Image (tube, grey):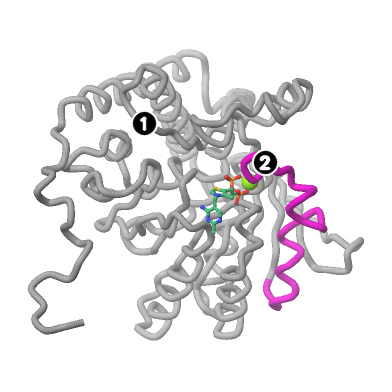
């Protein structure tokens, strides 16, 4: 694991790269295979959502394609059902790594009555799962940092040893909430990790119009915390960066900002056509930054995966996605009579 120091902007932002396979980052071959299975499963679920959208079965898709390597690897370093995650709308692979099943994701897309995210009440793509400490997504971007920092404060006061992690895009990182959240978390050395998934665009706005510096992570030094830049297609580099940040948070040494440079392989959403504002050559070049084939090739070259195992994982993932689709198709819609449940205070006497 090579870690270099940036000097040109005078900050201590580090660049992390995976220097070897499992052993270098403390993972067994079996764990690497499970990690690959999750990256591939999140992609398979995501691709199915687009098919269902174009077939008129689900109304809206906001995709994580291109982000899955970073999402799976960074979330992997947390303790499931102990730590906390405040996701954003692209966090399909994060949500699945943290405990949501393909059925859970697709029932959210179909807005069924038994959808664990919200019982069909949230907007599409707003995943959450109370039993897994996975917060519900808030539609205004970046607000989740305040929720996550609040959870980290509670964990510190209660001495639970829990870490709170939140995820957002580079465009969202410009919201005022991020300054307030990071400043507070840094001052109080909270067990908190901020993950920026920098995909180079905020809808159709390119990063050159979002940021006046190359790396969001450079801002970390302004809060007195480490900022780390990782290649989002380098799955093991992402895992290592997250492992260090989580260990630091758990040890009481405060927050870390991780910036994963990812690619957005789809339009912003199913209602967007990125060929209208991104040149064909740029889109072609982005394909080479897809984490799924990169991770597969890396594991195959190291002898962790072979063609037979890759084919088996693909077939098993397809069966999981087929099952989830059939399941979500059959589940009933919420009862309209309950539409206002959890919207207004119930059983409360008096005037407001
Ligand atoms: C406060 C707020 N402003 C604007 C929007 C509309 N909006 C939704 S997603 C988005 C782009 C965010 O870009 P980025 O943070 O880079 O994430 P990405 O979608 O690229 O993953 C915008 C502007 C919003 N949801 N909330
Ligand atoms: Mg973006």
Q: Nearer the viewer, residue 193 or 276?
A: 276
Residue 20 at x, y percent in the picture: 67, 41
Q: Report if residue 227 lies within the magenta region.
A: no
Residue at 46% from the left image edge and 46% from the top image edge: 89
Residue at 61% from the left image edge and 64% from the top image edge: 175
Which range of residues does the magenta coloring cover? 200-225
Q: Is mark 2 within 8 Å of ligand 1?
A: no
Q: Which mark is residue 193?
A: none
Q: Examine the rendered structure and indicate whether residue 13 appears above or below residue 347.
A: above
Q: Is residue 129 left or right of residue 336?
A: right
Residue at 69% from the left image edge and 69% from the top image edge: 226
Residue 274 at x, y percent in the picture: 64, 29
Residue 243 at x, y percent in the picture: 55, 58
Q: Which mark is residue 20?
A: 2
Farthest residue toward the front? 351
Farthest residue toward the right? 8
Q: Is residue 169 left or right of residue 47?
A: right
Residue at 13% from the left image edge and 33% from the top image edge: 332
Q: Nearer the viewer, residue 209 or 125?
A: 209
Mark 1 or 2, nearer chain start: 2
Q: Is mark 1 within 8 Å of ligand 1?
A: no
Residue on which the image places disc 1? 59
Q: Are marks 1 and 2 in contact (CB under 8 Å)?
A: no
């Amino acid at each position: 694991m090579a870690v270099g120091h940036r000097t040109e902007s005078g900050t201590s932002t580090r660049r992390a790269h995976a220097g070897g396979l499992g052993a270098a980052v403390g993972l067994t071959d079996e764990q690497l295979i499970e990690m690959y299975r999750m990256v591939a499963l999140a992609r398979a679920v995501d691709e199915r959502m687009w098919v269902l959208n174009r077939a008129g079965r689900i109304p809206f898709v906001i995709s994580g394609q291109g982000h899955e390597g970073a999402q799976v690897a960074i979330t992997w370093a947390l303790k499931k059902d102990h730590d906390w995650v405040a996701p954003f709308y692209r966090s399909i692979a994060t949500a699945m790594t943290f405990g949501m099943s393909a059925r859970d994701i697709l029932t959210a897309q179909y807005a069924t009555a038994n959808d664990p995210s919200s019982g069909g009440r949230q907007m599409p793509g707003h995943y959450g799962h109370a039993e897994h400490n996975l917060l519900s997504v808030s539609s205004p971007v970046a607000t989740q940092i305040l929720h996550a920092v609040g959870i980290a404060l509670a964990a510190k006061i209660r001495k639970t040893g829990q870490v709170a992690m939140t995820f957002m895009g580079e465009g969202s990182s410009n919201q005022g909430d991020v300054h307030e959240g990071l400043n507070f978390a840094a001052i109080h050395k909270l067990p908190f990790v901020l993950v920026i998934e920098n995909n180079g665009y905020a809808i159709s706005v390119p990063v050159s119009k979002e940021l006046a510096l190359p790396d969001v992570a450079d801002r970390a030094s302004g809060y007195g915390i480490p900022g780390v830049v990782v290649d989002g297609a380098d799955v093991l580099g992402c895992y290592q960066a997250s492992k260090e940040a989580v260990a630091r948070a758990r040890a009481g040494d405060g927050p870390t900002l991780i910036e994963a440079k990812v690619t957005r392989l789809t339009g912003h959403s199913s209602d967007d056509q990125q060929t209208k504002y991104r040149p064909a050559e740029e889109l072609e070049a982005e394909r080479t930054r897809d984490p799924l084939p990169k991770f597969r090739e890396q594991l195959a070259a190291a002898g962790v995966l072979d063609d037979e195992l890759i084919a088996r994982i693909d077939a098993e993932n397809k069966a999981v996605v087929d099952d989830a689709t059939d399941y979500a198709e059959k589940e009933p819609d919420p009862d309209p009579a309950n539409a206002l449940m959890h919207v207004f205070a119930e059983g409360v006497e008096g005037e407001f």
